[in-house]
Image: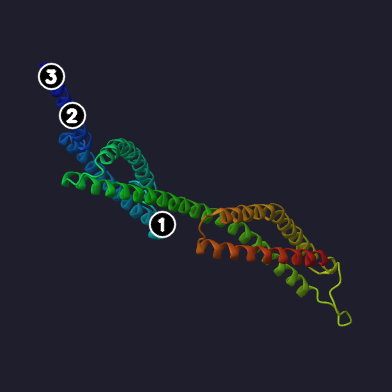
Amino acid sequence: MVLGDERGERVAVAERGASESDSASAAPPVLDELALFAISSSVTEILMSIQDLNTLLFEIQELRHATSAAPSAGPPQSTGSSPASEVDAALMRLDAKMDDVRKDYALVESQVQPLLASHAHDERSELGLLRQKWVDAVDEWDTVQKDADALGDELKEDKWLVVFRSVSSQASDMMRSLDKVLVQSQHFVADVHGHARPSSSSSAPSPGRLSRSPSAPHLLSSFKDLHQSLRAKVKYYAPATERVLAILAKGISDRRTKNGEVLRRFGDMQGQWKGLQERVELVEHEMQRV
């Protein structure tokens, strides 16, 4: 009788243990409120850091606009930093800040996600607040990264525009110099025609007229100097201008976005260069007949 009572008691204890085990397995994990508070504070710090990044992005945009307006505002001051150098310094701060936030974000993410996953069905307000804060942090971090990338692309385009203006100005200077000597050559040919008009029996100017002109020595010397100048400028400026236009064309085709100012100016330069090439051939032909 005693043995039977002991057996029954052991069975009851086992059943209670199984029941308690089942209840324990069904119960949610214990929430460490101190750890929850620490993680929530870390998420708040991430949100504040992202806000700092947004502020820095805004400041860089303001400096960028100041840089683009600088050429029309007059020469830079001899003292103080230029807007361009301020943009570069701000970009360095942005890159450093982005790296710091990226590391902090990865660390907090490794803490938040396991906690929220283990309490997925826990509806306590503390966890609900953490979930919402983390959703906001993920969204804002994604947005600020895209904004930083977009700013980087815009600044690259700004630098390309500066390079384009500088290089295109060099090409324009070469074409302007070539145009000047072409105009002088055309005027010279017209003067020669004026000094030695054909007789009434001649319907067109004949070759070698310059040598028969009364002022032949002076005109011949001027002709040689002018012709040498024309040929020298064509020799050096023509291939240089071709190279510059080819470089600019490649740069324009490689751009992700198309700038209206660049396209208009480049189109004008191409038209100007084509016209100059045609005039060079015409003037060279006319000077050969003088």
Give the quadrant of residue 39.
top left
Residue 15's disc is 2
Residue 68's disc is 1
Element assignment for label 3: helix
Q: As drawn, is 239 to the left or to the right of 39?
A: right
Q: Is residue 233 above or below residue 212?
A: above
Q: Where is residue 208 in the image (x, y as percent from the top left)?
A: 86, 67
Q: Between disc 1 and disc 3, whose residue precedes?
A: 3
Q: In this view, does 11 lie above or below 263?
A: above
Element assignment for label 1: helix
Q: Is residue 276 above or below residue 27?
A: below
* Amino acid type of the residue tagged 1 in the rendering: Ser
Residue depth check, mark 2 versus mark 1: number of the one nearer the observer: 2
Q: Position of residue 93 (x, y in %)?
A: 33, 41
Question: Which of 43/59 is in front?
Answer: 43
- What residue is drawn where x is 53% and y is 61%? 262
* Amino acid type of the residue tagged 2 in the rendering: Glu
Write down the residue under mark 3. 6
Q: Position of residue 187 (x, y in %)?
A: 70, 69
Q: Are marks 1 and 3 in contact (CB under 8 Å)?
A: no
Q: Between disc 2 and disc 1, whose residue precedes?
A: 2
